[in-house]
Image: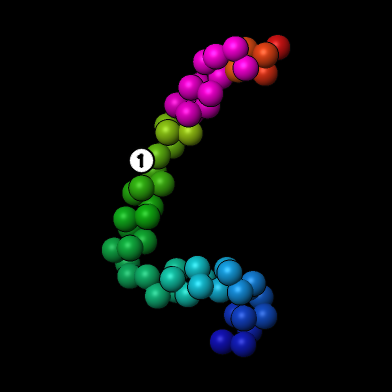
Amino acid sequence: MPFCIHHFRKRSYERMLAIINASEQDYNDLSNAIGNSKDAAQDMADTMLDNLAGSMTLI
């Protein structure tokens, strides 16, 4: 474990342990959630550009 602590910051260490300790079902759920969210980023980008500030950004 010292190797892991050396290569991961303290804040990232807890996240790394969560990933290591996750079950196969947890991985599958995360993978599905990421796969199902691919259009969400584009929808949000479209919403953010659909106003005066967005028009100025596009210019």
- Give residue 40's position: percent from left, percent from top: 42, 33
Please identify the residue farthest to the bottom as the structure is shown: 2
Crowd rating for badge 1 (residues with CA inside 10 Å; few <14, some 14–19, many 20+): few
What quarter of the picture does the C terminus occupy?
top right
Q: Is 57 positioned to the left or the right of 14 in the image?
A: right
Residue 58 seen in the current view: no
Residue wearing tag 1: 36
Q: Amino acid at mark 1?
A: Asn
- Give residue 5's position: percent from left, percent from top: 62, 81
**Residue displayed at 36% across by 47% down:** 33
- What residue span does the magenta drawing correspond to? 42-53
- Give residue 19's position: percent from left, percent from top: 45, 69
Q: Is residue 52 magenta?
A: yes
What quarter of the picture does the N terminus occupy?
bottom right
Magenta: main secondary structure equals helix
Q: Is residue 47 magenta?
A: yes
Residue 18 seen in the current view: yes
**Residue displayed at 34% across by 49% down:** 32
Reply above or below: 10 against 39: below
Quadrant hosting residue 58:
top right
Q: Is 22 positioned to the left or the right of 9 in the image?
A: left
